[in-house]
Every structure is written in C-alpha cells, then in structure tokens.
Image: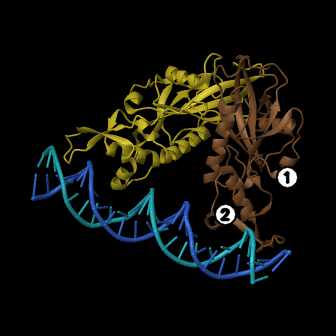
Chain colours: A yellow, B brown, C blue, D cyan
Amino acid sequence: MEHTQQGISLAVSTVIFALRPHPETGLSTPWIPLVRRITKPYEGRWALPGGWVSPEESLADAAARNLLETTALKPAYLEQLYAFGEVGRSPDGRVVSIVYWAMVRPHEAERAAEGENVRWHPADHLPKLAFDHNAIVEYALWRLRTKVGYSRIARAFLGETFTLAELREVYEAVLQRQLDPANFRRQVEGSLVPTESRVSGGRHRPPRLYRHDESIELVDNGPLASP
Amino acid sequence: MEHTQQGISLAVSTVIFALRPHPETGLSTPWIPLVRRITKPYEGRWALPGGWVSPEESLADAAARNLLETTALKPAYLEQLYAFGEVGRSPDGRVVSIVYWAMVRPHEAERAAEGENVRWHPADHLPKLAFDHNAIVEYALWRLRTKVGYSRIARAFLGETFTLAELREVYEAVLQRQLDPANFRRQVEGSLVPTESRVSGGRHRPPRLYRHDESIELVDNGPLASP
DNA sequence: GAAATAGTGTCTTTGAGACAATATATG
DNA sequence: CATATATTGTCTCAAAGACACTATTTC
C-alpha cells in the first residue's frame, strides 16, 4: 500500500452517475459503475472506482484519470464531494479518501467498459460495498438531488440539444417524482436557448429542440477558480 | 516537512469565525484568528491555523486539536469546508490541505490566546496571506453567509439564551445588511423555545429571552453520521 | 377525426418583505 | 409623559403549483 511519510495513504474515488431505466419500474433512474476489488481488503466486494493520488496531479485530475482508467468514461460534470478520513474506515492502515462525484451523458455511458470486474448498478439498490462506500453513495445521491433543485447541472445528463420533455425526464429521474409539464417549462425556459429545429416522428405535435445557455458554466472548478 | 510515502503531505487548517465590532463602522462583523508563520515557506506571513494530520486522529479531530493548540479555542460549530490539492499551492513540496471552518461564541472568543504570533483580523479586510489562504477565507465566508440563509447555524455565535434582537444582530453581521425586526421574528420564532425570563434595564419594553430548540443539531458530523 | 403530447392561460396558495400600529418598559 | 425597542397586524408582490384549455402533429 502506498502511503505518506505520515503513514497516511491519500486516495481518490468517484461516484459516477448516469441515467438508465430502472430494472423493475422501467422508469429512468440514476445508476453508478462499481469495480470489483481483486486485492486484499474487501477482496471480491464491489467498490467505487478510485486509486492513489500521484504527486504531479491535482485531486480533480486524479479523479478524472482514475475514472478514465477504470471505466473509460469522460464525465460531463465533476465536483468534489467530501474528504473522508475516519481512523477505522479501512481495516488495513489509515486511508484518507477525497471523493468526487460525476455525471456522464447517456451516449458516453453506453461506451463504458463493462465486464467481469466493472458493472453498473442502480444507485438506490446496491449490494454491500467495500469500506464506507455505501454511505458515500448515499451522500452523493443526496448532493445530486439537492443540487439539481437549485442549479442547472441536470443538463449534464443530456447531449447538445434536447426537448423540454427530455429535460423534464432527467429531473423526474433524479428527484423520483412527477413534474407538471406546464410549470416545468416556465421554470427552465429562461435559461435555455430555443433552436429552430423540432423533433418529428412522434404521433403528436413535434416539440422544439433547445440548447444550453453557454453563459452558464457546467463544470465545477472548485472555490479557487477565478470567475 | 512531514509527508506521505506518496510524497504528499496531508495538512488540516481551519477558518475560525467570531463576531466583533468592525474597527471602522463599529458594527458587528466576522473576524478570524491568524497565525504568523515562523518557518520557511512564507516566513513572517499571516496564515490560517493548522498543522499535520497524525495517523491516530480523524480529520475533524485534527482540526479541533490544532485549533485548541494554536488559539486555545473550542468551537461551537465545526464543519469541513473543502480539500485543497492543487499541485503548485505550496512552493515547497506537495501539500493537500483539508480545510475546516468553525464558529465560536463571543465569550469563548475573548479567551482566545492573542499575542505576537496570533492575532484576530476582520475577515473582509485581510493582509496578503501565505499560500492560497486568502481565497480559502473568501470561500469560507461565502459558505458561512450561504449557510446562515438556509440553516440554523447562526445561533452558534450566541450563548445559552438570547433575545431576538441579539439573534437578529448575528444575522445582520453575517449577511452585512439590515433585517426587519417584525419579519425576522416571524421567520425564526418557530424554531426557538421562549423562556419566562425577560431582560430588564434598557429604557424600553423588556425583550423575552429565548433558548435553542435542542432537537436541532448544531454540530455538523459529516455525511457518515448516523441520524 | 382520434390520440397524444406541445404549449398557453389562469387561479390559488404560500412566503417574503414593506410598513403601520400597538405594547410596555425606563427615566 | 417622552423615548425606545418589543411585538402584532396588514398589505403587496412574486413564485410555485394545480389544472383547464388550445395547438399541431401522426395514424
């Protein structure tokens, strides 16, 4: 195990969210990729993707690199969640984990390397994970739901253009409740740019496509970022 | 310098807030204690109190211990702020700092050990600090102001009992604007327990004393805390 | 035209805030 | 009683939500 001269190891892990249909209800719901541990503490258990921080990379870079290496995913949004450093959280030495959380677009999520040791799970129905990772995912879910309520990050789950129905379905998937289409439109319309395109093909009035207002930053660069 | 086997040092620092009169306006405003650096990187500069994390203590314990050692203060509220880990933030090796922020009561703040190398400063008018500490204080101030708006932490600046005017002055000091006494009363009254005591002595109608609703937790135990 | 969703209009409720009015202490 | 703050009352405005209604496409 790598560790500091202090005898403390510094790790980075990431809770990666993508939206997929729920296995039972079929409704869109958050999923996360987990990695099966192949080394000693908690061997065989599912865990959050992560690894050690190297001296030449920032914490966010370490999170992004690790995410790419273990799942081949590039996140549309990445934000620091919390630093977990309780003494007994790893049975095998002292580990402080800086945990990030991320959102990936559905097209990106399909490319995710899935296999024997990497698999997606519905975030609200996880097996018993290694370390304190169950509690960490709970907290990340809480942060996702809270932040969707007061910011515009929900659109990180979508592509370049989208209909209001698609955006509403993202909110419904995250918040796990139905939203009124009429009221929803009024709430988000001001921060969206309408395009001239519409989506035809459905057996109903074709909806307009919208685009993100580019003046709104999607990536969280942390408190030190200059605006 | 202590550092990990990874070659990364793990530090803890704390932004400690107490309310005192502003040197110019005389109005109550947030102050923070700073420590003068007596060792090489940024020697002579003011910096946030902090130190290295030892393997036997949690991050929050390390913050509280360090706070006690350098300023002799016990916080009424302590919460993790952010983990700062940019590569170049210390000119002398790689340092990752887990930063906490704290609130202390006025009675406690008076006991603070002040001297040549420890001094209180108004948080909105600081000298050029060591490392990235100016930006960190900015962020802590932002967190304090934001959180006062949607939670009940403001009362961590007060003692056991207090009048509504005293509580309102805390909000006014943090938010830096006047609040209507009538509307303020209605907003906070539901979460306070009225006592039978009143404060006499002023040349006006004596105000009632209130107490915290004990069912509301003041200390932030982090996302892993079981409720 | 039937079905289905897109999109608009309107009413109610709720909370924040401005501000007037009344209450009760001290000197 | 004058003064000063405590405390209550009332009005306005804005946002959220419920829900009726109109629009436009495919089949």
**Is B211 on the left-hand or right-hand side of B145?**
right
Q: Report whether residue A12 is seen.
A: yes
Quarter of the figure that contains the N terminus of chain A: top right
Q: Secondary structure at mark 2?
A: helix
Q: Secondary structure at mark 1?
A: helix
Amino acid type, callout 2: Ser
Q: Chain of mark 1?
A: B
Q: Which residue is mark 2?
A: B191
Quarter of the figure that contains the C terminus of chain A: top right
Viewer-closest of A130 and A77 = A77
Mark 1 to mark 2 CA distance (whole Å): 24 Å
Q: Earlier in the sequence, mark 1 or mark 2?
A: 1
Q: Report whether residue A93 is seen.
A: no
Q: Residue at x 69, y 36 (%)?
A: B137
Q: Residue at x 45, y 45 (%)?
A: A174
Amino acid type, callout 1: His
Viewer-closest of A134 and B1 = B1
**Is A178 on the left-hand or right-hand side of A15?**
left
Q: Which residue is mark 1?
A: B107
- Residue A207, percent from left and from top: 25, 44
